[in-house]
Amino acid sequence: MALRGKHLLGIEELSVQEIELILNTSRGFKEVFTRPIKKVPTLRGKTVINLFYEPSTRTRSSFEIAAKRLSADAVNFTVSASSVVKGETLIDTGRNLQSMAPDIIVIRHSAAGAPHLLAQYCKDSCIVNAGDGMHEHPTQALLDAFTILDHKQNIEGLKVAIIGDITHSRVARSNVLLLRKMKAKVYACGPPTLIPLEFDAYGVTVTYQMREALEDADVVMMLRTQRERQKEVFYPSVKEYSILYGLDKEKMKWAKRDAIVMHPGPINRGVEIDPEMADGEYSVILEQVTNGVAVRMAVLYLLLGASEEAES
Amino acid sequence: MTLLLQGGKIVDPSQKLEKKADILIEKGRVAGIGKIRGKKSWNRLDVTGRVVAPGFIDMHVHLREPGREDKETVLTGSQAAAAAGFTGVMCMPNTDPVNDSAAVTRFIIERAREAGLVNVFPAGAITKGSRGEELAEIGEMFKAGAVAITDDGQPVENPQIMRRALEYARIFDIPVIDHCEERALAAGGCMNESGVSTRLGLRGMSRAAEELHVARDVMLSRITGGRAHIAHISTAESLDWVRQAKKQGAGVTCEVTPHHFILSDEDIKNYDTNFKMNPPLRTPADVKAMVRGLADGSIDCIATDHAPHTRLEKEVTFEEAAHGIIGMETAVPLAWEFLVRPQVISVPRLVELFSVNPNRILKLGRGTLQEGAMADVTVIHPDLEITVDVSKFKSKSRNCPFHGWTLHGAAVMTIVGGKVVYQRRG
């Protein structure tokens, strides 16, 4: 069974069956990490190019390691050392790379729709969205779901609180889409200045009060204030923001005893999350990172390898 | 050359005329309407089944010359206008250099004369360089042929400048055309701020950005007695302000583009930059309000905001793309398909929107087919089925969201000053 369609551009286009396929496949790949030789030959001879226009610690190394563990060749494209600095356009960059016949191009870009533009003009490669502006970050939502399922029976019926700079967050959008497809009860919380118009149209409850969001929550997902995307001032000070919307021990008491605390990273310690919460017993933040590699292996495998299962 | 158009339906609201008749054109002017027996020496054209109207004017066109001749020139823009059924266009001053002087105004008029096709009426800038700081030499531009002033492309940020412009323009009785946008509320957005921009992850421009300036211009028009014309109106509330202003007798008029009475932000698919313009596509409710405004008289004219851009400026990410789409060569078919055919408006009303009202607002002295009038005539085939093919456009640019659309009703002949400047083949 292969993922229908050639690209992974967002959660929006994925069906529940496809999401479950990816998550189940991820489980199998996570097992590879426990072996002395953390490699399977599945994507031997395939080339994966990481085209990252924005800085990244986790996602990029995660995709690179995922590709290598599948025995594929991973190429990292550093924008600052490329002809992009000479003014080469996204389409030209994509076309030139495509001429070297990569199997997958993983792209992260500051502009929403950049992967879609690439997919339109580079019809021979498979495009994976590693984050496009404020729009989507599908593999993040998938690894978040995978992490939740490591701790909870089902996603259906869980209360998930997503807290922080929702407006500028592609992680928030992708997570909300996925969690709603899987029928979780989602609460979006932040200052009104950082919650975009009609966000409740996603089927979530919008609240400006941390308490309402955290009360009996099963999952608490904290988001970083995306200062590099904020072009104006949305709250009076970091101090006030963190008093109202930062996660600390006191506020965590409102959540369920067995709740988990998540964060896509990088964390701003002391702003949206106390060090105690980031490193404490509720936190699954580092598990998310581990799971990220497994999920990305599953995505690369299903987009490429699975369609050639018959041959091998 | 004496021209006789035979058998068409003359639709001329200025004479309350809507009947089948022949029209005789002599020495560039309308010589008569009625049952006219043709002489052999005349150029007799059979327009049976066609609508014959006073020449259509597109009062919002960017011809890009001087400065961006790669996108469009006065010549190619004139060719596009003629093929679209327009006998005249008003061109915007956001050229390079900005048309803030008699010299640039004269240059544009001269280029139009060289093209020898349609009338080009330049709008001059309100402020020098459209920088919004000092009034441009409006009197000099008016003498050189400017018919209105606008800083279009830019809003007039300083309300006191807008006030002085409205006052000063009264010397020449020309309208001050405003691109209504409070930049701070537009917040660097690239589409309408709504549930759609939220879903697409794109920065939105609040509808309040337009409404604030529309309200401002209504108030300023009232206190100055000047004529404010709202360019490319797009929201329901903006239109409510104009409606209210008209009820109170203020000299406020407005125009709407075809894309704003047909497309909404929900039509933006796959980040297609042919759906990016300023003002942006609004909600379906706003589209309905625009249609209502066209029907009830609140909107005075249809003007395309024809904004040519090169492929380089459009084949990029949505947020990077230049704002704007071309519009002249789809205007009449779109208006006919979406307003006339479903009987939302009558044919005389369409002629008001495209001809009578632009002429009235800009005081061009045309917009009528009465005896002695300048023979600017637009002939429309009401049942002609066309499939929009941008590759065949006369415009230099191709940024159009309507490619492939099947529409009915199109201009088949355009006559300027008694000369046929466009006739559809086949």
Image: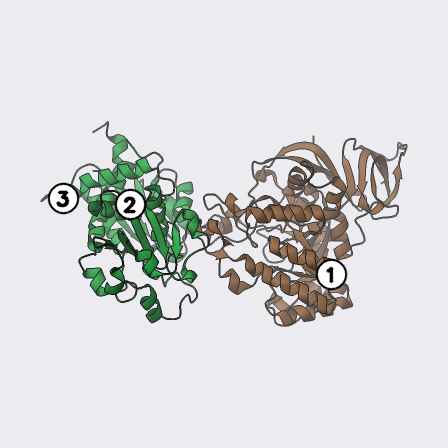
Q: Colour of chain A?
A: green
Mark 3 — residue? Answer: A38
Residue type, label 2: Leu
Quadrant including the C terminus of chain B: top right
Q: Which chain comes out brown in the rendered image?
A: B
x, y percent for residue B203: 46, 56
Quadrant including the N terminus of chain B: top right
Q: Where B313 falls versus A42 (above or below)?
A: below
First reached walking from the N terminus: tag 2 or tag 3: 3
Q: Where B70 falls versus B102 (above or below)?
A: above
Query: Is B318 situated left or right of B59 in this image?
Result: left
Q: Residue furthest left?
A: A36
Classify 10 Å Cα crowding around label 1: few (below 14), some (14-19), many (20 and above): few
SS of the residue at dot 3?
loop
Classify 10 Å Cα crowding around label 3: few (below 14), some (14-19), many (20 and above): some
Determine the residue positioned at 70% across, 60% down: B245
Question: Of tags 1 and 2, which is closer to the observer?
Answer: 1
State which chain disc 3 sits on.
Answer: A
Image quarter of residue B41:
top right
SS of the residue at dot 2?
helix
Question: Disc 3 and disc 1: Cα gap in Å?
Answer: 78 Å
Mark 1 — residue? Answer: B248
Question: Disc 1 and disc 2: Cα gap in Å?
Answer: 59 Å
Mark 2 — residue? Answer: A142
Q: Is residue B101 visible?
A: no
Q: Is residue B335 visible?
A: yes
